[in-house]
Amino acid sequence: MPTELPSGRYMSCAFALPPDAGGQTRALLMRNRILAREGGVRPELLTLGGYHDHGERCERLRERGLLLDDMRVRNIFEHYRDHVWSDDAKPVRELEDLSPDLVREETTPEGAPWRAVYRPDARRRPVYDYLRADGSPFLRMRHYSKAKKWSWPDSIQRIGPDRTVLGEFDSLGQWFRRWIRELLGDDKRAFVFIDSRFLVPHLVPMLGPRIHLVYKMHNLHVGPPRRWDSEMHPVYDRVLRRINGMDAMVTLTQRQRDDIAERRGRTSNMFVVPNPVVMPDPPVPRPERDPARVTIVARLEKQKRLTDAIAAFQRVLESVPGARLDIYGDGAEREALQADIDARGLGDSIVLRGFDPRAADTLWTSSAFLMTSVYEGYPLSTLESMSRGCPVVSYDIKYGPREQITDGVDGFLVPAGDTELLARRVVELLSSPELAQRMSAAARARAESFGPREFLATWAGVLQATVERKPLRTRIEGVRFELTRLEPVSPLIRLLGRRALRLEAVVEIDGRGGGTGWDAVDFALAWVDVDTGAVTALPLRARRSKRRFRLRATIDPPAGNAWLRLRLTWANSAWQTEVARVRRGRLKRSA
């Protein structure tokens, strides 16, 4: 029986869809192809970055089979280039003349006007006028970096055909959300997928009962040493601060969902949907596997740690002198990697093949696939390798390889950084055709469990849950926390050698629960070890009077350095605070 998806518009948002698509873009496009072919919906792809070759990019994606012919890609700049602003207000003022500060004029591939670049102040960022086909401006804004919040424009001017300013947006988000609402029109429901972490601050929250915001996290959110409590890049901090405003926050693995839940609370809007793989038909006739061939398909960037792969393959050659490693992909590290290959004298055995859209076809004849990344979100390249029966030898990193590979059955998992063991596993596959054949069959069977049918069924469950839980969404607007007592239980117990403390506190919540009552508020108290990240849950009693809660607990301070965390979760919302901290055996209340 086919999977039935909830009715509504299906819109996927990204800043761009680069033709030389990386894993995130390929995953976005694959999801939409499956939604169209298997789910019977008509997905719409929305891009929110300005690119002069928008149409050319789409054609290249279609040529490579990544974009279906009838799948529409809309761009916000192209939309307003072709459509008059729908402002009913009278013009505000004449557009300031910046022609003396013109730096250059940019055109589309066909030679039509596209953008004028001005630099009215050498110390500040350039100003862009985005142009209609007749050369008149329709939008003015400063240059910005999507990763740097300080650069985001606070004035985006809407310009009429007569060069009058019709109004201004005070943020990118205001403009982006307005466009999506315009596209939605009078339709009753839309699922708005956000596939870029850079877009989250601009689209979340988007209030309204008919819009369901679904964020898909494609990447690792923590830095070294990659614990749940490791420091995050500000981009991911902005994402996690907005989970309360999402209808669904979707990770690729349960481990990542658990790590995020440990950081900020396990709310009702957190889901897991692994990336799928479309099983390719074997070539006819089916080629033999080359017992000397190893393959990598990866961007040539530091994240992929390809210097480890090169070092490991040098060891492989000591046992299998005729082995060859083909590395497909381009990136900033190409020259450095080639220099490393040359310095080791491996130019005849390791070849950088560059980007090749047909690179996956070589996996039908390869005997092993290497994955040496520092981190991943959930790599597609490993699934694509397994779907072609090519066993993967991968570092056991966060996240993905462990969820895809059964060590010793359909591939090998190796501790990150262990190039010696990595090499030994590759040698095992190259030296034993029987092992390679057995793992090849197991890898392809394993990949089948990540097929489109399972993927679609999982998404149907997530989307149906967002529909059912929409009326139950909560919103915490403020929390008043008062620690009324944190002291030894009694002098007698202290004399007996126990350090037990009595904790009493009052929490009052200012918020809205929709159809979710105050009884659904859940409190949790825990010690968090500063050095290890270990979390020790503590018993806690809570008594409610309307939106006011009295909390009581008897706790023992830990011996090491730790902080005492109080957390509340209320359906899709979460809040937490540090109550106290232990340093060198001394307890101190937190501010």
Image: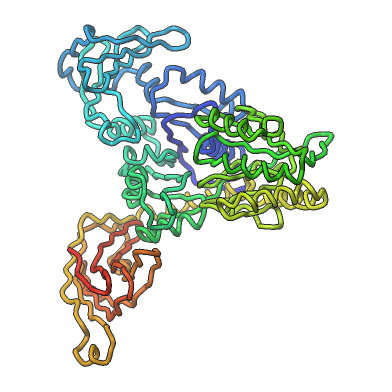
Estimate the x, y position of residue 463 in percent, counting from the top left.
Answer: 47, 49
Quadrant assignment, res 500: bottom left
Residue at (50, 41) in percent of width and height: 303
Residue sticking out furthest to the right:
285
Estimate the x, y position of residue 514 in percent, counting from the top left.
Answer: 29, 57
Q: Does residue 132 lie above or below 294 as drawn?
A: above
Of 549 and 589, nearer the camera is 589
Q: Does residue 294 lie above or below 428 as drawn?
A: above
Visual colour scheme: rainbow
Residue at (77, 40) in percent of width and height: 321
Left or right: 93 in relation to 5: left
Left or right: 510 in relation to 391: left
Q: Which quadrant is home to the C terminus?
A: bottom left
Estimate the x, y position of residue 42 in percent, counting from the top left.
Answer: 52, 34
Of 221 and 107, nearer the camera is 221
Quadrant assignment, res 270: bottom left
Quadrant assignment, res 238: top left
Residue 369 in view here: yes
Of 109 and 68, nearer the camera is 109
Residue at (71, 30) in percent of width and height: 348
Q: Does residue 213 lie above or below 341 as drawn?
A: below
Estimate the x, y position of residue 104 in percent, counting from the top left.
Answer: 33, 9
Residue at (30, 64) in percent of width and height: 568
Of 319 and 88, nearer the camera is 319
Residue 208 in view here: no
